[in-house]
Amino acid sequence: MREENIFTGKYSVPFLATLACILWGTAFPFLKISYQELGIGKNDYLLKILFASYRFLMAAVILLIWRVIKTRKSISHDITTLGKKSIIKLLLLGFIQTTLQYFFFYNGLANTTGVKASILNTLGIFLTVVLSHFIFYYDKLNLQKSLGLVLGFSGVVLVNLSRGEFSFSFNFLGEGFIIMAAITSALSNLLVKKISLKIEPTIITAYQMLMGALILFLIAVTGVSPLSLNMSLKALLILIYLSFVSAAGFGLWYSLIKYNKLGYISIYRFVIPVSGVFFSTLLLNEGITGYIFTALVFVSTGIVLINYKRT
């Protein structure tokens, strides 16, 4: 079956988009567990950035190995055929998507509550849909999309407010950084849509992660040693899993972006915070409430509404 058929199918698109977002959702509790295992404190910003750089570097390696096995083409072949302009675009994407977004998100999360971060981070979904309306003539915002967005956002708010920890205070290093992470997320999605017209999604994913991870690494080693993380077997296994999540999640997502309208698939990203809360309750014993299932109904209804007449 052709790749395009897989990523445009009536049933495969919802399945793959939901799968990618569920995978991303599992990253939240595993990150918390890894920080506990490695002894990374709330204010250990550079250690978190160092850990992130290893995560995305490993994810890039996983994708590159997969590509070599699948296509039987060497990495040097990719670099040669990409050309200077494409490499610059991938470097820019890596800086925005991996370096900036995760720099803002990791450090912002340390200065605000998980609830506020989860809600504010969904601004990236709204920005993606709104900007797509103005940039892509075939992806206009309408009443159906608007109602779907409202339902999805309501689900995220509901599941997070049930956990408490919410206030209307604002700290730029906390809430401000999370908003910046949301903005960079939206910009990177738009950039991927443009780049994927000429470059394969797997190449985009692997090389932007590689470049972004290297920049994160250089930032981290300005203040900590590359060997600062006391890696136990448990922490290493979690790192491998998180790398797989990044490789699979972004690999699927970039392929979906290539073949679908951003305005339609962006709604699935509301699944991320809901699944994050769900898996946190299972893995961190945070307690399951009926709000989680109600939130899933809201998000699912929003997804169905936006894609109802999709052919």
Image (tube, helix red, strand yellow):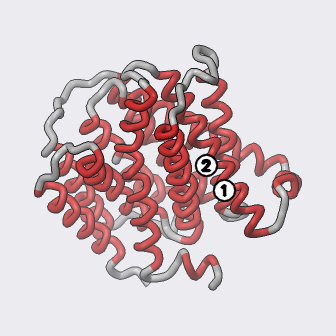
Q: Quadrant of residue 73?
A: bottom right
Q: Is residue 105 left or right of residue 147?
A: right
Label 2 sits on a secondary structure element that is helix
Q: Quadrant of the N terminus?
A: bottom right
Label 1 sits on a secondary structure element that is helix
Circle 2 packing at 10 Å, graded few (<14), some (14-19), many (20+), is many
Which residue is at 34% across, 47% downward?
122
Q: Is residue 181 left or right of residue 168?
A: right
Pinpoint residue 139: horizontal percent, then vertical percent: 47, 67
Task: Name the foreground residue: 32 vs 258.
Answer: 32
Q: Amino acid at mark 2?
A: Ala
Q: Residue furthest top?
A: 223
Q: Quadrant of the C terminus?
A: bottom left
Circle 1 packing at 10 Å, graded few (<14), some (14-19), many (20+), is many
Residue 196 visible: yes
Task: Name the foreground residue: 310 vs 296.
Answer: 296
Residue 101 visible: no
> In the rendered view, would you say 84 is above or below 34?
below
Pinpoint residue 8: horizontal percent, then vertical percent: 52, 78
Q: Quadrant of residue 113?
A: top left
> In the rendered view, would you say 147 is above or below 100?
below
Pinpoint residue 19: horizontal percent, then vertical percent: 42, 65
Q: Which residue is mark 1?
A: 63
Q: Are marks 1 and 2 in contact (CB under 8 Å)?
A: yes
Task: Name the foreground residue: 142 vs 259.
Answer: 259
Which residue is at 53% across, 51% downward?
246
Which residue is at 41% across, 54% downward?
130
Q: Is residue 113 left or right of residue 91?
A: left
Task: Name the foreground residue: 46 vs 97.
Answer: 46
Q: Amino acid at mark 1?
A: Leu
Q: Which residue is mark 2?
A: 59
Q: Is residue 293 left or right of residue 102?
A: left
